[in-house]
Each structure stands twice: as structure tokens, then as C-alpha cells.
Amino acid sequence: MNKKGDMTIVSQRNIAKNIFELTLKGDLVRNMNEPGQFVHVRVNNSYLPLLRRPISISSINKEKNECTLIYRAEGMGTELLSKKMVGETLDVLGPLGNGFKIKEMALKKTALLVGGGIGVPPLYQLSKELKAKGINVIHVLGFQDRETVFYESEFAELGTTHIATADGSYGEKGFVTDVIRKYNLDFDHLFSCGPTMMLKALQEEHGHKDVYLSLEERMGCGIGACFACVCRVSENSTDYKKVCSDGPVFKGGEILL
Ligand SMILES: Cc1cc2nc3c(=O)[nH]c(=O)nc-3n(C[C@H](O)[C@H](O)[C@H](O)COP(=O)(O)OP(=O)(O)OC[C@H]3O[C@@H](n4cnc5c(N)ncnc54)[C@H](O)[C@@H]3O)c2cc1C
Ligand code: FES
């Protein structure tokens, strides 16, 4: 299966403060069959920056051979990416990693999808696929402040959507865990992506349920060869897993957060 190819930028737009939505067209889309996988993008043709940047696949459009990424321009790589124009091509490796394996799951009635900041994007494709299977989806999305909120209406079209901001400037004030408690949200499956502290809090409170967590770790190769992205499986063991090739999605409790 060809994992590397050129993709053409068909649109790039600024959707919130420092947040960009980038749509790419290319044959790699044919292999994108699992929500939660990522692509590893070369943001420049020169040596700087040398390493590719991992970005989750936010939505997949098979008919058009397109996929959409949503990213925050924060460092050198993503700043460069945000300057790319429609019609330019990008060298992309993907789809990579193990995503949310909902095709293999005996899904029950309700799924709670919890996203934090730039962990929100992969949940969009996941939500679309769950909804298509007749699952009731509830979203709890956490952001820093009003200016960084994105895709509220896109998620709201698929199911009930709660927005929380850390400073209370939009939606509920506080963390995603506060919202889940406040509304006493009941669910059969929990899917989450976001900062490790958030995943840890969710695992502590809901670890007895069916939980899947998507992790971000600094990456080198993105394909399991360089060991840059390892995480330990437990406190008293030296065993580890690689976020790029064993993850990024893990079952709750599978790794040490
Ligand atoms: C599986 C996965 C999925 C991701 N999905 C998204 C997404 O959908 N949207 C989005 O905005 N960001 C996502 N990220 C984070 C994104 O990769 C980093 O924000 C980005 O690499 C930062 O690059 P930079 O050059 O702008 O910053 P710099 O700080 O200059 O990056 C330097 C190096 O650190 C790595 N790095 C920096 N921050 C992170 C981070 N938080 N996680 C992992 N590596 C990092 C870079 O890959 C690079 O090698 C994802 C990360 C992973 C591992
Ligand atoms: S990034 Fe190289 S092993 Fe995961």
C-alpha cells in the first residue's frame, strides 16, 4: 500500500485564532478508512524544518478524493504550513497509526466524544461515522477562550454539543470534566483526544467504562522506526508502546498517562 504521495491544497482558511482548516486532494485518501489516524506532513522542500509534522485527519471525503486537516499555527512547521497557497502540493505520509476501531466494535447506544483544543479535529470524522451507524453522539469540546473555538456548528449538526472554555469567555466556564459532571452525561463509550492532563482526568473518572484515548507525542519518523514517541505501559514495567505505530489511539488503561 502506497503510504507516501503528493497532495494538492484545494483550500486553506483561517477558522479561529491561529487555527487553520486545510483541505488536501490526492490518492492517499483511498487508504483513509479509520477515524483517528494521522498524516505526517513535510512543510517545506528545504532542510528546515527537517522533520515532518504529524496532524490528525479531521474529515475524509472519498467521492472527492479529499481530506481535511485542522491545525494550530504555533511553531516553525505549522507557521510555514499556514502560508501555503491553494494549488501548491505537499509531500504527505499517511494514513498512519491505529485510529478508533469502531468497525470492529459492538457499539451500544450512546457515545461521548470529548476533545480538547487541537485534539478536537479527529473527533469530527469519528462523530460522522458513529452517527451514520445510528449511534447517539454527544460532544464536549474544551478550548482556551472564545477566540479559539472552532467547528461548533459542524459538531452540533451531528449531536448535542457542549462547549467549555478555560476562562469562561464562551460556553461553560471550566474543563470538559466539569461539563460531564454538571450535566451528568451518561454514555456507553467514551472517545477522547486532547492534552494528556485531560485524558488522565477522564481515565481516572471513567476508566471503568469503555474508553479510548488518542495521544500526542513528539514524533520523528512517524512509522515506528526511531523510538522518539515511546510511552510506558505501567509504573512498574519497562515495557513501552509507540504512539505513532501502536497508537495514537489506545484503550483506556493500556498505557501510563
Ligand atoms: C498523532 C498526532 C496528531 C496530531 N494532530 C494534530 C492536529 O490535528 N492539529 C494540530 O494542530 N496539531 C496536531 N498535533 C500536534 C502537532 O503535530 C504539533 O503542534 C506540531 O508538530 C508542532 O509543530 P511546529 O513546527 O509548529 O512546532 P515546533 O514546536 O517548532 O515543533 C518542533 C518539533 O516538535 C514536535 N511537536 C511540537 N509540538 C508537538 C505536539 N503537541 N505533539 C507532537 N509533536 C509536537 C514537532 O513534530 C516537531 O518535531 C498532533 C500530534 C500528533 C503526535
Ligand atoms: S515517531 Fe519514530 S517510532 Fe514513533
Image (cartoon, helix red, strand yellow):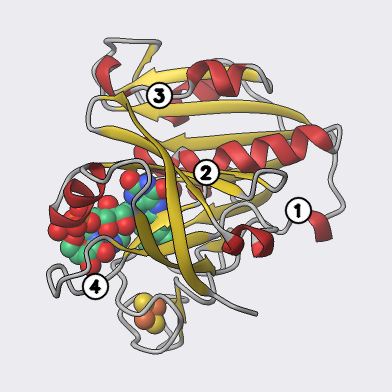
Q: Amino acid at mark 4?
A: Leu
Q: Position of residue 189 (x, y in %)?
A: 71, 43
Q: Residue at 66% across / 65% down in the picture?
A: 31
Position of 108 compared to 10: left or right? right
Q: Residue at 84% across / 46% down in the picture?
A: 107
Q: Which residue is mark 1?
A: 102
Residue 216 visible in the snapshot: no
Residue behind label 2 places its C-beta within 8 angstroms of ligand 1: yes
Q: Which residue is mark 2?
A: 58
Instruction: Give the number of the disc on residue 132.
Output: none
Residue behind label 4 places its C-beta within 8 angstroms of ligand 1: yes
Above or below residue 114? Residue 175 is above
Q: Dot 3, how many residues are within 10 Å of its Cα: few (below 14), some (14-19), or many (20+)?
A: many
The mark closer to the camera, 3 or 1, is 3
Q: Which residue is mark 4?
A: 51
Q: CA distance from mark 2 to mark 4?
A: 21 Å
